[in-house]
Amino acid sequence: MINYNKLIFELSNQDRIGYSLPKQRFTDYNIENLDPSLARQTELLLPEVSELDVLRHFTNISNKNFGVENGFYPLGSCTMKYNPKINEEMASNKAFRNLHPLQPTNTVQGALEVYYNLQTYLSEISGLKEFSLNPYAGAHGELVGLMIIKAYHEDRGDFKRKKIIIPDSAHGTNPASTVVCGMDVVEIESNELGRVDLEKLKAVLSDEIAGMMLTNPNTLGIFENDICEITKLVHEAGGLMYYDGANLNALLGKVRPGDMGFDVMHINLHKTFSTPHGGGGPGSGPVGVTEELSKYLPNPRIKKLEDYYYVENSGEALGQISSYFGNYMVSLRAYTYIRTLGKENLRLVGPYATLNANYISKALKPAYELPIQGYCMHEVVFNGLTNKDTDVRTLDIAKRLLDFGMHAPTIYFPLLFPQAIMIEPTETESKETIDDFINVMHRIAIEAKEEPEKLKQAPTKTPIRRTDEVFAAKMMIFSYKDYLEYINNRG
Ligand SMILES: *Cc1c(COP(=O)(O)O)cnc(C)c1O
């Protein structure tokens, strides 16, 4: 039997052809002036396969992928909500798809209007004055936001402020962006409630603090009750407040970061605003700022004068941080999502997401250790099984879930709890799906006691079993050539 899962080169058969191109030779194209040294001298190494074989090969590979359209995907901090198909329909509309970013603005008024309106919606939702949709991802937005904070201090001739305060519960991109921006991280320990410890915060405030990065609700899914006091303290010390709004899901239409006292923020359109993500695909991390900081927003900017939309490049801006206007199609999907839900329904996202997380929290509490009591927001963090007498670990639980056709939650993050399991169900899951997950988690807890070997062996139903993660990270095989090299060296 032919195994279409084999590498495409292994399916190759000499002179088998899977394409038909026009008969022109390359001289028929207008490239006479091309430097001959640029022309390929040797045959290109390509697999020789028929169109049908290639199709089967890739279809089979795609079937091994797991996405939100395959099953429950409670990956904490990632907001794997359903991406409504109408968003895709909009993004594949020819009227948008065939545009060129350098087209004269009078020929793309509709596209600019979408952009401008989305900027305005995000401002309204977040309580910050102006937005740029240019950053490509959350981490990119963080970098841009931090560059704005840096520019703000340096403009005032204050070059001492190089430190950014970050709680230990923060997403890993926060300290990473800080370092990339050339600033230093000051980490503060959370208190026993998983929140910012005000005394510890006061102790690190000084005239060297450029600002503080905070997620609220934080990555434990806990709302920072003292948020107004926190922003006040940092402002009094001369620092600015950065809001990591990658997951705005819990607060949407309810609470605004601008009202909490934040000066700069980013939003992940590929989380809260339901555009697809994962696998490093296109994302978008719009950055919003207060009026005072808006002059630093990156170029190009979309502005409106009466009924005309135009592109502005300002000398005061940070400069350009993406090619053209960021990922336009992602913005278009997010815009469609907001317009489809409307103001009233957007307000229901947070309550449903929060209800689902609390429902899971309560239902799993007998079997899984809940280190932080009380209500959570959009996600809940457990610390392994309640029963610590088995040697079943969080990794085993996560792997076993795969056998039930569910994606694993985020594990071993946040770092505050050694056996962290971070579950974010999102608002788009039905009660039946969530009950199903709860039943499976309880069953796994029983297995941990009665058949721990089963969990150590898991997964058994996936195309590959447990991967050697160290090997995968150290010996990356990206191409058939790499693969051959690896096989040959292995002997
Ligand atoms: C996902 C996430 C980020 C990073 O976003 P990317 O688009 O993956 O770069 C930052 N902070 C938090 C809290 C997140 O959940």
Image: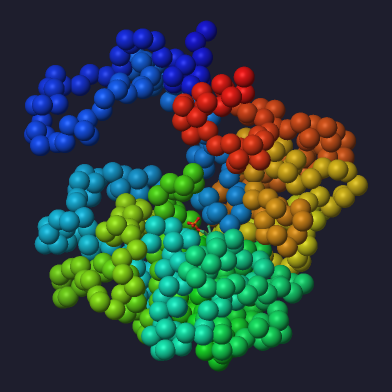
- Identify which residue is drawn at 56% across, 78% down: 163
- Identify which residue is drawn at 87% across, 49% down: 387
Task: Using the image, determine if residue 72 lies above or below residue 107.
Answer: above
- Identify which residue is drawn at 78% across, 62% down: 371
From this viewpoint, is residue 362 visible?
Answer: no
Q: Residue at the right extreme?
A: 389
Q: Could you tell me residue 181's position as x and y percent?
A: 48, 69
Left or right: 444 in relation to 170: right
Task: Using the image, determine if residue 238 lies above or below residue 473.
Answer: below
Task: Using the image, determine if residue 333 lies above or below residue 126.
Answer: above
| Figure colour scheme | rainbow
Q: Nearer the viewer, residue 15 or 272?
A: 15
From this viewpoint, is residue 110 visible?
Answer: yes
- Identify which residue is drawn at 75% across, 40% down: 396
Q: Residue at the bottom extreme?
A: 236
Left or right: 324 in relation to 180: left
Q: Nearer the viewer, residue 40 or 233?
A: 40
Left or right: 299 in relation to 449: left
Left or right: 116 in relation to 196: left
Q: Nearer the viewer, residue 145 or 380?
A: 145
Q: Could you tell me residue 450's position as x and y percent?
A: 88, 36
Quadrant of residue 326 within the rendered picture: bottom left
Q: Could you tell me residue 287's position as x and y percent?
A: 40, 69
Quadrant position of the C terminus in the picture: top right
Task: Using the image, determine if residue 43 lies above or below residue 447.
Answer: above
